[in-house]
Image (spheres, rainbow, N blue to C red):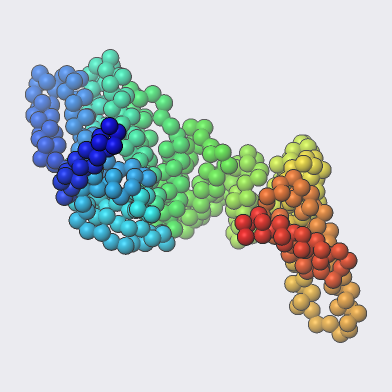
Amino acid sequence: MKKMLFAAIALLLAAAPAAQAQKVNEAALRSKIEKSDADIADAKKSVKAATWLNRGKAFYEAAQEPTKSLFVGVDMIMLKMAMGDPASTEEVTLLDVPYKALVYPYVTVYLRDDKVATWKQTREVMPDAVGKALEAYNKAYELDPKTADKVKAGLKQLSDYCSQLGNVGLETGEYKTSAEAYKQAYEIQSSPAYGEADPALLYYAGYLQTVNGSQDPAAFVDGAVELQKALDLGYADEEGNIYYYLYHCYYGQKDQDPANVMKAKEVLLTGIEKFLKNERILDGLMQLYTSEEGVGDPADLVTMIDKAIEENPQNIDLWFGRGRIFNALKNYDEAIASFKKVAELAPQLFEGNYCVGAFIAIKGDALNTEMNQKQYSSQAAYDADLKSVNEVYMSAIPWFEKAHEIKPEDVNTLDFLKSICFRLRDEAGMMDLYNKYNELFKQAKGE
């Protein structure tokens, strides 16, 4: 029986005519809007909340109709069943990623591995349909607050649609369009009937404006406004990168107003107090202190963090920050001492042990470079320096071995161990260690 049923379904599918083109009934959508225009012009109908609710729905449908069948991950067969055959198919590259582009009348859909990855809408049914839908829903709530639930449902659809626009634009490199979509999603959620708006939407908008700033410096202005507002509303992403992006937005405006350099500095200082492990913030501070006159002495950063450590000497994050600052200043001994303190405070913390080993290796690399630039007058002097450099590398091994013990699958740790052991292969036992860690490295990489 099941075989007969499946066979019947297969025959139906085979017999069904394939859709030939994207179906967007623009005439019907416009007809609804024209009817709504007439209704709001009618003195009796225009004072009814239902009239404006219907108008909001009509504009929302006009906005989302061209892309309503699109979902990330849908395969090409299902896409064509839903939207018909494209007008053309092309091979394109976006942000260095190759895609198959299916060109429809209202949208271009980008596929990777024959599945929908993203898309770009190229034609609208009605200009500013989202804005007009928002206006209509707000009017409905104004006329009758009892419609709050229905209005909120409509607003949520609008906000979700804008958030989706923002998300798909990331893959296509449409950063400005994406930023504006996220900003509009926040504006929609700020409507009286919606409740509390999510400031993360402003963060996404500001971040995208920051990225877009490399192509269009004017984007830094909007990015600064959106990121600052998100912070004022109490938002901060988990790692504190909002401070780094806001720094870029202010710093990107320094040519228009030099005062923005100090604004950038204050943002980073505020951020580093809250997110001491954030390497981006530390890198931003080091860039400012070393490239801009009048910002301050890089040693000020050390003073700042050492003062904080005096007040809270058991704070691991502070010691992490101290280590990274000294690394940026190329004071490797102090960087190593800082990370050794981290390992002392938390002996089983992988990052602490790994960082001690890594910064000892960095110190060894620096000494090795210095040694290679010297002109030696005797073999004895060369041998003495080589011994000193190798002793530095040797001292990194126990820290990496401890890190490996804590996190055996970490490929970077094994890479350091095999490389250092190979360098020291003439020392007793080092070649055996190299063979051990080289084999483990290959296993970890699946070779």
Does 34 sit above or below residue 166? above
The picture quadrant where one finds residue 384 is bottom right
> Residue 397: x, y in percent?
80, 57
Please state if 301 lies on the left or on the right of 192 as rendered: right
The N terminus lies in quadrant? top left
Closer to the camera, 220 or 280? 280
> Residue 80: x, y in percent?
25, 48
- Can you name the residue that lies furthest to the top here? 146
Q: Residue at x 29, y 33 (%)?
A: 2
Q: Residue at x 73, y 64 (%)?
A: 419
Residue 147 visible at all = yes
The picture quadrant where one finds residue 212 is bottom left
The picture quadrant where one finds residue 151 is top left
- Can you name the residue that lies furthest to the front here? 1
Q: Residue at x 63, y 57 (%)?
A: 445
> Residue 331: x, y in percent?
76, 59
Please state if 218 lies on the left or on the right of 278 as rendered: left
Closer to the camera, 103 or 31? 103
